[in-house]
Image (spheres, rainbow, N blue to C red):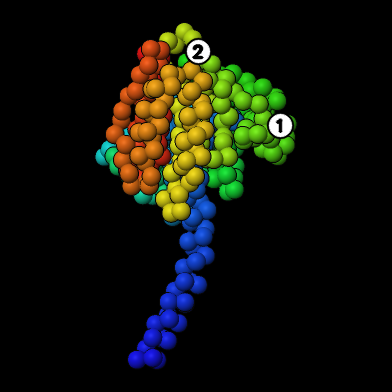
């Protein structure tokens, strides 16, 4: 009996040593939500979220390509092909196939486009670089940075990048990266009276807003992500306090209390927050979190 107990203890120790490195690595990544930036500005994915596949490639909803990079996207259900066209460049990717075409040339990826939850996901690096953009992976911040020579606005207008911003040919990328908008490093941004950093030490992620007064109540003033880790968990209470500080700048205190009470119901990735709207005399705050997703908080004018 004593020998059996010793054997069990030794087996347990072996399992711990074998599993520990993987758990440690996964836990580190779980504390950060995958972030995608285009020319220094964060891209918000309102529903289907980007993820890292088994080949360690970032997969994004193909709609991102059309909206963010100004490309035209087509889908052929019979052949399971997705086409992405921008200027004189045409990419053709086939679901589940590592071979893809750029104009008349056939190339090979180490991963493939896939269909997931009725969405088409494509490998971000291969598509972006195929369209002439540059892609950089920041493992410490769990972030992909894409830079292009031009920025395409929502109206389709192309504007040359400011040479002081990421994307210009002679831009000092390393110097810019060292001064990213992390809390305490740079000045706050301000949108309609709400002051905020683009990244908080707590993990809170307000998307950089491009709201204009003429939008009225047709656009979100500010969209904020409260990141939730799936192993050890993020510092949810610290994020809640940062969120509360942002909301209290303009929103009625009683309404903020109601919002925060609901937000704090999300304690784990498995918890679901059904979409709920809170209102004061001026604003409406929409809160929602799906299964295994972050908490999304949107600020609108009523």
Name the foreground residue: 163 vs 254.
254
Callout in the foreground (1, 2): 2
**Residue occupying the point 37% across, 88% down:** 4
- Quarter of the C terminus within the rendering: top left
**Residue occupying the point 38% across, 22% down:** 255
Residue 146 occupies quadrant: top right
Q: Is residue 53 visible?
A: no
Q: With 220 as the anchor, is 76 left or right in this view?
A: left
Q: Is residue 17 visible?
A: yes
Name the foreground residue: 216 vs 260.
260
Badge number at residue 107? none
Q: Position of residue 274 (x, y in %)?
A: 29, 34
Q: Is residue 135 above or below residue 210?
A: below
**Residue occupying the point 43% across, 18% down:** 252
Disc 1 residue crowd, few under 14, some 14–19, many 20+, Cα 10 Å: some
**Residue occupying the point 67% across, 34% down:** 185
As helix, strand or loop, the secondary structure at mark 1 comes to: loop
Q: Which is more N-terminal, label 2 or label 1? A: 1
Q: CA distance from mark 1 to mark 2?
A: 28 Å
Q: With 144 as the anchor, is 301 left or right in this view?
A: left
Disc 2 residue crowd, few under 14, some 14–19, many 20+, Cα 10 Å: few
Q: Position of residue 193 (x, y in %)?
A: 54, 16
CB under 8 Å between discs 1 and 2? no
Number of numbered markers? 2
Residue linked to disc 2: 212
Residue linked to disc 1: 171
Q: Residue furthest front?
A: 254
Q: Position of residue 140 (x, y in %)?
A: 59, 48
As helix, strand or loop, the secondary structure at mark 2 comes to: loop
Q: Position of residue 201 (x, y in %)?
A: 58, 40
Q: Is residue 240 above or below residue 115?
A: above
- Quarter of the N terminus within the rendering: bottom left
């Amino acid at each position: 009996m004593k020998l059996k107990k010793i054997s069990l203890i030794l087996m347990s120790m072996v399992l711990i040593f074998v599993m520990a490195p993987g758990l440690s690595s996964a836990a580190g990544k779980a504390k950060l939500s995958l972030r995608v930036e285009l020319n220094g500005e964060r891209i918000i994915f309102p529903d289907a979220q980007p993820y890292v596949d088994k080949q360690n490639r970032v997969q994004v909803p193909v709609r991102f390509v059309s909206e963010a990079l100004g490309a035209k996207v087509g889908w052929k259900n019979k052949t399971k092909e997705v086409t992405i066209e921008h200027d004189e460049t045409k990419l053709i990717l086939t679901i589940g196939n590592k071979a893809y075409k750029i104009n008349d040339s056939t190339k090979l990826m180490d991963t493939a486009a896939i269909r997931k939850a009725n969405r088409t996901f494509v490998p971000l690096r291969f598509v972006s670089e195929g369209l002439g953009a540059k892609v950089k992976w920041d493992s410490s911040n769990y972030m992909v940075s894409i830079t292009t020579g031009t920025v395409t606005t929502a109206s389709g207008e192309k504007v040359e990048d400011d040479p002081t911003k990421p994307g210009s040919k002679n831009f000092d990328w390393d110097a810019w990266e060292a001064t990213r908008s992390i809390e305490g490093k740079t000045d706050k941004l301000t949108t309609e009276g709400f002051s905020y950093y683009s990244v908080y030490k707590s993990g809170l992620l307000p998307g950089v807003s491009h709201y204009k007064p003429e939008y009225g109540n047709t656009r979100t003033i500010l969209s904020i992500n409260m990141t939730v880790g799936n192993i050890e968990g993020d510092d949810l209470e610290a994020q809640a306090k940062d969120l509360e500080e942002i909301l209290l700048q303009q929103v009625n205190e009683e309404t903020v209390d109601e919002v925060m009470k609901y937000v704090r119901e999300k304690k784990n990735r498995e918890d679901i927050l059904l979409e709920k709207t809170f209102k004061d005399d001026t604003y409406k705050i929409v809160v929602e979190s799906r299964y295994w997703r972050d908490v999304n908080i949107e600020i609108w004018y009523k």
